[in-house]
Image: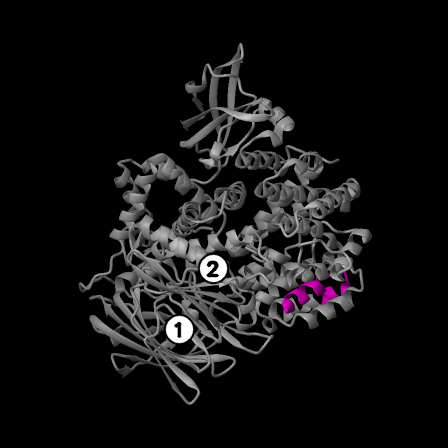
């Protein structure tokens, strides 16, 4: 799975018992040998929405050799579908416990065991059948059922396109939602084969894990027959259906052809840029087939753009789903194309690492995601036409990792996961960003080819099996003849990010002493070992030139670097050149002084990117005033020419400006002139940018995001009306909606009429969501009351994907006065949702609606909530703890402005 980089993405470990740990510490290999288990008493499953690690470990001993024959009858009613699950499996000798079959919120019509109708228990979460219904050895269960379609993006989700009435279905399961579609054993280490049959309307496409072998039409219904799949985990099985537009291509590999297909809704088909999909798909296949030294194992490869999708993408075997945000209704920027290519490569990497070889339990999910995140960038670096892909990794994944690792919610990369409900609570910057960053440093430590061989050997040895972290680490250690025990403990089992700073002395113009000093936060005092590249710079010939560099493996509190003693005294030292290490850098005093003079004089844009980041980190850490940063950026940004660096700096500038805006709103100091200065700067850059360039699009977006005053808003109205235009800049439908939202947010420019006009212009579901957001953003008490009632009392009337837009727009930072009357009701609703089973709705509501403000009062209130909510679900508690910390940091930053 890949989290979407788009802003729509609104995203605890509990120690498991020794039973669960023992079940997760060894490789799980399916065999046909009859298994046995010793049970002195039946194991009775807890009745709740989650599957525990304890129970999953027991069930793994209880059953084996699982195969499914699935039938689905879909598309014939608007609310539900029906189906049949036939489950073949081997039951262990000595079993005394009921067999439970995961199936949430369906209707079970009948259950047969070995051809005989049997009694069963079923309420909401799972079917339970007495052990006396089975025999040791081979058994068959048949479940006939029906179930409502999902409207929250999990299970089998149904979407009706408002543009033309077409209906689309898609499945999304990770980690524990496959049982929201059909009855089965929903845990990753019970890998199974899947034989699928589907009855559906004759005009629909049906896409699954395998390619259909026959389609027979009768009386307006087509019967689709799919062959038996390879052994895979249930969370990566797939079924998608609807009147999809389809494009086809072929990857011609050295080991044979791979048929490729791409699917999108009919109403969005005209916006799909085919080359943006098939080109990186083919490039990634070429790289991964060679790198892993294993041919793609699943035959065909389909990619489906799914409406209302909750994440960025999902690695369903041979039927990958993508968020429709990857479809642009205007011209794509290089950054957008890179984001798509990265996601394509990420999901494809999972076909080997995650689908072919799968973690035993959800504590191993981080390795799946981290590995795919790292391999995606490596594939783009080695096999695509994109430049500076590691810069994108640095500004995206790595900064996400650092932020999370410095937060109150940080955690070790590898940690126990007690239940499936806990699996996604640590789906964060550690799981993705830190894990990928740590993996990025391993080839520097072991050697590039040793790392590759270790990965390849691991995938070959454990194909179609389940593994633990130890299996992966052992494979790397054997390939490189390196003991990784201490490295594993320090990096994977301990939380926190370290900081390094250089300390040096110069005499007579040369270095006499030089050391790397390492520190750690008090809460996580581990000092780690890793390899970094140290760069020394001096100013000459109008440039800050790299005069010396040396690779250093540092460890402990201080590491002497004798290799640079005697070298010319540097004006700036950067101890993580080329971003080898996972570590934050504090620049020494001399380097900071040089940076203030020469920020634009470094030849290497990647280095400039990291130097700017070090400065902005000082703002976030309340060491540098945001006003100082804004002034420094305005002084130097015009001299920067690299697009990636400009994108990063301008984002940081807008972030620092946000603190000044907050300070103005709270009456600390009036920074309106500074905000106007930034907006004018963005507009000037927009006017002077090359027509049609990515830079022009970037400056346009920055200008719109900082538009507040009547004169600035009047420019937006003129742009919307076509009276103000910029050569080469297309004001497409998505840009129009952004303007309409801004006008409604500030209630200017005939905003109501313009919203009504835009609704008529754009009848798509994207338009409907934007219309809701535009209305909700209005600073109108009546509008807030209307939508608060919908969110609280009638959430089922909207799909979760739509509801997110309403919640996101309710109380932006400049409308905190309108939020005040609702504070108690918001908290009461969070407490109510906490007792219910819809974790996605709980997380979305708490994440969007929790009342916060950059004040000491809010900080104190949130601190009290942390204590009050200490026993609530992680989706709530972690969000409150994070908000408490962020408000505290914001207050410290604003104190610098007093």
Instruction: Give the crowd class for mark 2: few <14, some 14-19, many >=20 residues within 10 Å.
Output: some
Among the 4 quarters of the image, the one containing residue 463: bottom left
Location of residue 787 by image quarter: bottom right
Is residue 771 in the magenta section?
Answer: yes
Quick check: can you spot residue 226? Answer: yes
Residue that lies at the very extreme toward the bottom in this rendered image: 219
Callout 1 environment at 10 Å: few (<14), some (14 to 19), or many (20+)?
Answer: many
Label 2 secondary element: helix
Q: Is residue 535 left or right of residue 129?
A: right
Q: Position of residue 360 (x, y in %)?
A: 33, 55
Residue identifier under label 2: 277
Q: Residue at x 28, y 57 (%)?
A: 255
User: In the displayed image of the protein, which residue is found farthest to the top?
Assistant: 508
**Quarter of the C terminus within the rendering:** top right
Q: Position of residue 29 (x, y in %)?
A: 25, 57
Q: Is residue 106 above or below residue 865?
A: below
Q: Nearer the viewer, mark 1 or mark 2?
A: 2
The kind of secondary structure the magenta stretch mainly shows is: helix
Q: Is residue 418 visible to the viewer in this orientation of the structure?
A: no
Give the magenta range.
767-785
**Is residue 477 inside the magenta stretch?**
no
The residue that appears at 42% across and 72% down in the rendered structure is 181
**Hey, which residue is sitting farthest right in the picture?**
710
Mark 1 and mark 2 lie on one chain; the one further toward the N terminus is 1
Q: Label 1, on which residue?
A: 182
Residue 481 is left or right of residue 600, and the answer is left
């Amino acid at each position: 799975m890949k989290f979407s980089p788009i802003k729509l993405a609104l995203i605890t470990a509990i120690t498991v018992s020794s039973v669960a740990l023992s079940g997760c510490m060894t490789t799980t290999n399916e065999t046909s040998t009859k298994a046995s288990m010793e049970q002195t008493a039946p194991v009775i499953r807890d009745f709740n929405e989650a599957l525990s690690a304890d129970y999953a470990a027991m069930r793994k001993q209880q059953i084996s050799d699982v195969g499914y024959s699935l039938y689905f009858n879909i598309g014939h009613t608007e609310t539900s579908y029906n189906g049949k699950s036939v489950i073949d499996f081997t039951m262990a000798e000595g079993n005394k416990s009921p067999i439970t079959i995961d199936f949430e919120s369906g209707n079970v019509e009948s259950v047969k065991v070995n051809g005989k109708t049997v009694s069963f228990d079923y309420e909401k979460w799972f079917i339970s059948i007495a052990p006396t219904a089975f025999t040791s050895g081979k058994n068959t269960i048949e479940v006939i059922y029906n179930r409502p379609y999902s409207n929250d993006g999990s299970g089998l989700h149904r979407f009706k396109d408002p543009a033309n009435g077409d209906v689309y279905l898609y499945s999304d399961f990770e980690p524990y939602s496959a049982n929201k579609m059909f009855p089965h054993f929903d845990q990753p280490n019970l890998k199974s084969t899947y034989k699928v049959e589907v009855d559906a309307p004759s005009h629909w496409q049906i896409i699954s894990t395998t390619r259909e072998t026959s389609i027979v039409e009768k009386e307006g219904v087509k019967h689709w027959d799919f062959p038996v799949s390879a052994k895979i985990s249930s969370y990566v099985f797939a079924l998608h259906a609807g009147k999809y537009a389809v494009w086809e291509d072929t990857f011609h590999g050295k080991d044979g052809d791979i048929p490729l297909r791409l699917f999108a809704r009919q109403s969005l088909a005209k916006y799909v840029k085919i080359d943006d999909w098939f080109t990186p798909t083919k490039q990634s296949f070429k790289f991964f087939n060679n790198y892993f030294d294993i041919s793609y194992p699943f035959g065909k490869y389909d990619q489906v753009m799914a409406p209302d999708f909750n994440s960025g993408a999902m690695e369903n075997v041979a039927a990958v789903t993508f968020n429709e945000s990857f479809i642009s209704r205007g011209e794509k920027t290089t950054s957008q194309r890179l984001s798509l290519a990265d996601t394509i490569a990420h999901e494809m990497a999972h076909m080997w690492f995650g689908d072919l070889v799968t973690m035993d339990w959800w504590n191993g999910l981080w390795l799946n995601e981290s590995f795919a995140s790292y391999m995606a960038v490596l594939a783009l670096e080695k096999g695509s036409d994109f430049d500076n892909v590691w810069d994108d990794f640095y500004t995206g994944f790595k900064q996400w990792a650092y932020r999370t690792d410095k937060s109150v919610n940080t955690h070790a990369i590898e940690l126990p996961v007690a239940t499936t409900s806990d699996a996604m609570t640590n789906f964060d910057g550690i799981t993705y960003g830190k894990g990928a960053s740590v993996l990025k440093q391993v080839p520097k430590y072991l050697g590039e080819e040793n790392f590759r061989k270790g990965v390849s050997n691991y995938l070959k040895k454990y194909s179609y099996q389940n593994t633990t972290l130890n299996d992966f680490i052992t494979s790397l250690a054997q390939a490189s003849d390196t003991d990784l025990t201490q490295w594993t403990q320090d990096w994977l089992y301990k939380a926190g990010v370290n900081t390094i700073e250089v300390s040096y002395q110069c005499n007579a113009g040369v270095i006499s002493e030089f050391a790397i000093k390492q520190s750690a936060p008090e809460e996580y005092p581990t000092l780690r070992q890793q390899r970094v590249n140290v760069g020394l710079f001096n100013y000459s010939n109008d440039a800050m030139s790299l005069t010396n560099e040396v690779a250093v493996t540092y460890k402990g509190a201080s590491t002497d670097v004798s290799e640079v003693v005697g070298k010319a005294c540097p004006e700036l030292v950067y101890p993580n050149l080329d971003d080898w290490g996972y570590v934050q850098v504090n620049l020494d005093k001399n380097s900071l002084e040089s940076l203030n003079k020469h920020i634009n004089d470094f030849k290497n844009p990647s280095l400039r990117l990291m130097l700017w980041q070090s400065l902005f980190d000082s703002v976030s850490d309340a060491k540098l005033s945001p006003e100082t940063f804004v002034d420094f950026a305005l002084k130097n940004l015009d001299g920067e020419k690299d697009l990636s660096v400009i994108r990063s700096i301008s984002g940081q500038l807008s972030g620092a400006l946000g603190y000044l805006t907050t300070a103005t709103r709270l009456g600390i100091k009036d920074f309106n002139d500074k905000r106007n200065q930034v907006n004018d700067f963005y507009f000037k850059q927009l006017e002077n940018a090359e027509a049609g360039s990515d830079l022009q699009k970037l400056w346009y977006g920055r200008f719109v995001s900082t538009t507040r005053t009547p004169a600035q808003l009047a420019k937006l109205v003129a742009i919307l009306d076509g009276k103000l235009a910029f050569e080469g800049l297309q004001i497409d439908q998505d840009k129009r909606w952004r303007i309409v939202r801004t006008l409604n947010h500030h209630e200017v420019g005939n905003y109501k009429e313009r919203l009504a006009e835009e609704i008529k212009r754009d009848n798509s579901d994207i338009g409907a969501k934007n219309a809701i957001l535009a209305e909700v953003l209005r600073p109108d008490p009546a509008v807030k009351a209307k939508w608060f009632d919908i969110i609280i009392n009638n959430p089922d009337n909207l799909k979760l994907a739509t509801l997110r837009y309403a919640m996101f727009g309710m109380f932006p930072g400049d409308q905190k006065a309108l939020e005040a009357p609702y504070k108690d009701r918001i908290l009461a609703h969070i407490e109510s949702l906490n007792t219910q089973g819809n974790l996605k709705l709980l997380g979305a509501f708490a994440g969007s609606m929790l009342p916060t403000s950059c004040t000491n009062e809010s900080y104190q209130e949130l601190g009290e909530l942390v204590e009050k909510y200490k026993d609530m679900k992680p989706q709530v508690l972690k969000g409150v703890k994070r908000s408490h910390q962020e408000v505290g940091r914001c207050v410290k930053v604003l104190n610098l402005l007093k």
